[in-house]
Amino acid sequence: MIRRRSGLLLGTSLLALAGIAAQAQTPPPPPPVAQTVGLKAIVITARHRVERVQSVPVSVTVIDANQIKTVGSSNLNKLQQLVPSLTVDSFNPRNTAVNIRGLGSTPNLANDGLEGGVGVYVDGVLLARPAQTVFDLPDIEDIEVLRGPQGTLFGKNTTAGAINITTHPPSFEPQAAVSASYGTQNYLQLKGYASSALFGSDKLAASIALEGTEHNGYDTNTTNSERYGNQNDKGIRAQLLFNATPNLSIRVIYDYSRQEDNCCVNQPFYLFNSYANGTPLPAGKNIATLDQALFGYTLPTDSAFSRKSQVDQPVYYGMETGGATVLADYDLNGFTISSISGFRYWNWYPHNDSDDSALPVLAVDYTDYQRQFSQELRLTSPTGGAVDYTGGLYFFYQGLNGQQDSYYGADAGDLLAAQKNTPTALAYNDAVDNFNGNFHTTYDTRSFAAYGQAVFHVTPQFDITTGLRETYEVKTGDFNEVQQGGLALSSVPGALQPTVTAIRNAVASVQHYGRGVDNTLPGGLIDFSYKVTPNILTYATYSHGEKSAGINLFAITATNSIYPQDVKPETIDNFEAGIKTTLFDNRLILDGDVFDEEDTNYQATTAALTGTTIFTYVVNVPKVSSRGVEIDARAQPTDNLNLFASGVYDDAFYESFNKGVTPVEDNPSAHPNTNETGRAVAGNSTWVGSFGGEYDQPLPPAYGHDIVAYAGGNLELKSGFFSGVDDSKYEWVPGYGVGNVDFGFKSATGAWDLSGWIHNVSNTHYYLYRAASGSFPTYNIVYGQVGDPISGGVTLSGKF
């Protein structure tokens, strides 16, 4: 344990030094929200009132529109480059995992019967499925990333943290903005925004934002020269603001987004031929030997960065999401009564080539159709008294229908049998050629919660914040699997019928079951904060959050004891101490914290081999620990130069996990479980840093207009991580650094902006994930997906 505690001791020392340095300054009085000198004051609304971020004892990073511009996207996949403690793993949208401090959900494997532990909210409404976070959101005002349990402030799913996204409300003053971008790979993005009062009214205003993005992909399918990685995204957000009375404001929001992408082809790049102990793989599990012997086919295993693949099936997905939100705020003598009503939906329809080859072996689709409704009622007190408080009631419903279709092609039988033109091979061909295994799942959630948080101003310098939460949640799940297609059993010779039936049952059993769970889940917070000086805030926090039980929606097998159907609730206990400082006449903001999070019964999605089939399922890891240090800084050394830097050291590991999944190199067929105690939590990099800034240089006026030249960018550096829960050596993703730059000219008034940009400016080769299943149909293939190479373009934007 000396190694793990050393990081905390180092972080504590750094924070202590920062505090000593800060006290050595002669600080000015607290700056107002509107700053004329130094850094612009940043405000947050996470506690449901507008507050300066430096006065709130919460570990939080705020991303503004200017920073979003440097990474070229407003979805969380890109924005993680700016927030080191935020990790978003996504080899396709449905399999997106959002984590904070290494906790939240398992990367790269989805299970409909489980929610993530990081709540993503847009204008107060939860995005219940992680796939909804990969859409670009138009008209974003800012994004707040809050770390640690936040259940005493938010409605649902905030055990590991919360991401609070706020969009621009309509303006009564006429406004309009447009931008057009063009870049490599025929990248084209158009954005438009307009807002105004309606009919000259001082009570009714509306806005509309449109966004469309498309570009050609970087990957080539050598079987037909088609490109993969194409993007075709469209989105709209329309808002109506009605100030019915001086005390009542109602805001109605409608949004719709759609993606149609040829995406997510795995790149085979290595074949392993022996287990870790030196034992050669059986001939029936060596895909190169089998493909050559059975079909005379050689699977290409070039470098993944050749960006070439061979698939015989289309690989694509269609996805859409949308909904309506109604926000109402009523001012009652300084108290604010708020109602947040939200209806949302998400549809997912993909097609995948699961054998990653040009052979007709296996294609899999997993469609999802999700609907949700939430209603929140909240009371927020006025400020200025001895106690500030907020409290609320929350209801959430989600219905999710999923369906998986596994289509076995003409070569599947020979590959499963590992032989050809033999009685065994003929039986396998009769069993699976053009056979389809199909299962359908339904999953419903009903959640009822009450929460509250109060800030006691004990002295002008000393506050105590307390919070409580109680949630009652009910979940039901249903699983139904059937067999479809293939040769009619009556057409199979009688002697082979039992064998054919057994083979079909092994790849797709016929079964049905239903499950139901309910939980009462407490949560809480206590925080002590002290202002050492008006510009130095220190705090210490304990918070507790609980996530409800999950349901494993998968086929029951003979090894059902390994795959429990009900998954226990997960709890997180977070201990945190931090300091927030504003230094050098508001030229430097330096914040930091140390944290120690203990996660009990961590809900991890994983996979294991049963016969020839890989099953994904959810397990409880008895204990997971995440400990580390976070630093966040913003500086304005001169009036023309703005800088930011942030970093995290996070030692996230399985503190107790004696039934982990055996890595593929250790032969999971022989022993499916292994002890992973002390191993790293999947998806988490121990070290991550993000740095960036912008320099502005005023130029001589031209044609009566003041013009500013500027250059900026950001750099993300991260250490390696495991992209699968079994910590296989084949799933190790090496560390990397990715930088982006932008530069250009703009009007000093902001009326227009002409910029050039380069993403991945050093053309870094890096993996998004790497994996090896060890089972049919890929056997000993190591494959992965890689990040985008260098790209560039220009953007012209204007405001009116």
Image (cartoon, rainbow, N blue to C red):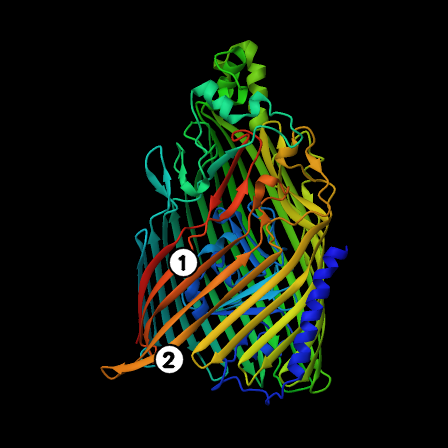
Q: Secondary structure at mark 1?
A: strand
Task: Work out whether mark 1 precedes mark 2 in sequence or the reverse, and give the earlier one.
Answer: 2
C-alpha separation, residue under disc 1 versus residue under disc 2: 37 Å
Q: Which residue bears the numbered disc 1?
A: 759
Q: Is 142 rendered above or below residue 503?
A: below
Residue in front for this viewpoint, 119 or 707:
707
Find the residue positioned furthest to the left. Answer: 703
Quadrant that contains the N terminus: bottom right
Local crowd size for mark 2, using a 10 Å CA cut-off: few (<14), some (14–19), many (≥20): some
Residue kind at label 2, given as amino acid type? Phe
Quadrant that contains the C terminus: bottom left
Residue kind at label 1, given as amino acid type? His
Who's the residue at 48% across and 62% down the image? 715
Residue in front for this viewpoint, 313 or 19:
19
Check if mark 1's residue and mark 2's residue have beta carbons within 8 Å.
no
Q: Secondary structure at mark 2?
A: loop
Picture quarter containing residue 302? top left
Percent of width and height locating residue 708? 34, 77
Percent of width and height locating residue 113? 60, 46
Local crowd size for mark 1, using a 10 Å CA cut-off: few (<14), some (14–19), many (≥20): many
Q: Can residue 684 be spotted in the picture? A: yes
Who's the residue at 46% across and 64% down the image? 714
Tell us which disc is closer to us: 1 or 2.
Answer: 1
Drawn side of residue 617 relative to residue 169, left or right = right
Percent of width and height locating residue 459? 72, 86
Residue in front for this viewpoint, 55 or 516:
55
Q: Which residue bears the numbered disc 2?
A: 172
Label ID, residue 297: none
Picture quarter containing residue 68? bottom left
Percent of width and height locating residue 557? 65, 31
Q: Can residue 150 be spotted in the picture? A: no
